[in-house]
Amino acid sequence: MITEPGSVPATVPSTVPVTTREPFPVVLAGARGHGRSHLVNIRRLERLGLVRLAGICELRPLDAAELEGFGAPEQSDDFGALLASTGARIAVVCTPIQTHTDLALTAARHGAHLLLEKPPAPSYAEFRRLADGVAAAGVACQIGFQSLGSHAVPAIRRLIAEGAIGELLGVGGAGAWVREEAYFRRAPWAGRRRLGGVDVVDGALTNPLAHAVATALALDGATRAEDVEHIETELLRANAVECDDTSCVRVLTSLGTRVTVAATLCAERASEPYVIVHGTRGRITFWYKQDRVLLQRAGHGPEESAHGRTDLLENLVAHLTDGTALLVPPDATGAFMRVVEAVRLAPDPREIPADDWYTVPGEKGPRRVVPGVDGLVAASADTLSLYSELAAPWARSTKAECR
């Protein structure tokens, strides 16, 4: 769903020529917060003649400054009415996690194709309702894992298939970020597992660092729900919230490999998240926000490469125009949704004892830091281990399993 602005890099400038076709009318639901990045991208695609902003669905209308460069798109807090009045062909949904399924199905009923922010839904049942509903309506749906638009992903998959690092052993992901206490108060649903009896399942693994999970699974080749055999989670929190802010997950895939991701929002210092592909004769490290890859293998020097990225809304337009395959259709996030479900069903995150964290000032207020967690996150990615297996004292007896 909603990520921090800048959680994925700006798209590489498009080389697509300006089209003579009538641009697709687009309605954006959720234009503030992370939604601003969608406004920026829609403006870019408007200049290419691919889309035009026909409407904005927000509880409070955007003012002229917020809409600079867009003219006067229609605004309403009634999503269905806005879709009908604008004749939108595409709906971009960037709203709270627990609203995704209903809004997506509303768009589908109006014949609008979808770009839906990640995570697509707060539970596997809601995900299936979403995926089955858009399929029945005959509309295209793209899930907003922008990292899966990176050209590095197929490049790494080719290296694995060619045996560049030998036999695939597993994939480890690492995300060490810092978030102030105010981050968990930015919206009523933030930091919540449930809200008003409805699942939200916000948390480090399922929302801010969800790209690490989805990307690790994609590099393993385990993207569908049926590719997952078994899941272990360790969910913890240093902040006074419901959700996990320091957590890890290990997935056993149908290929027999392990995919482990360790994440924290309580790092000593912020660092670039990355995914490591482990092989019998080498490893590949992918800094997915930067589209940067490092190949290390026996008998060769290190090889570093930078890659481009296809914007997911642009890919959706290409799909509708000439049948280009969608990069992230719903079924390609089934394995990720199995992880979301495991987090949802796990016991509530265990509180990290006050002696094991401290507070430091941040730009917008205090933030909590778990000393040593940066090293544990890196060690997890290196060894495919859970926190408790790395002797983290605050991670004892937190493991939950889901089959």
Image (spheres, rainbow, N blue to C red):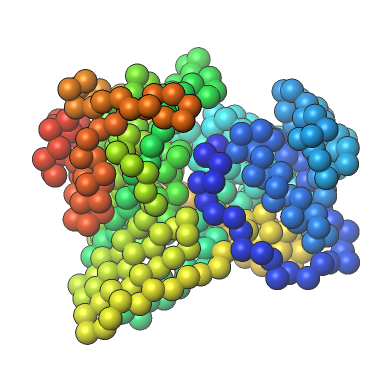
Q: Position of residue 180 (x, y in %)?
A: 42, 28
Q: Residue at x 57, y 48 (%)?
A: 144
Vertical order, 37 against 280 (above or below): above
Q: Nearer the viewer, residue 345 or 267?
A: 267
Q: Quadrant of the N terminus?
A: top right
Q: Residue at x 35, y 57 (%)?
A: 275
Q: Is residue 165 visible?
A: no
The percent position of residue 328, horizontal first and vertical second, equals 55, 56
Q: Is residue 348 visible?
A: yes
Image point (38%, 37%), residue name: 178
Q: On the picture, is 375 further left or further right than 197?
A: left
Q: Nearer the viewer, residue 210 or 197?
A: 210
The x, y position of residue 317, in whole percent, is: 72, 59
Q: Residue at x 34, y 19 (%)?
A: 240
- Asked whether, in this view, residue 127 is left or right of residue 273, the answer is right
Residue 183 in percent (x, y) is at: 47, 28
Q: Residue furthest top?
A: 196
Q: Indicate whether 49 appears above or below 307.
A: above
Residue sticking out furthest to the bottom:
299
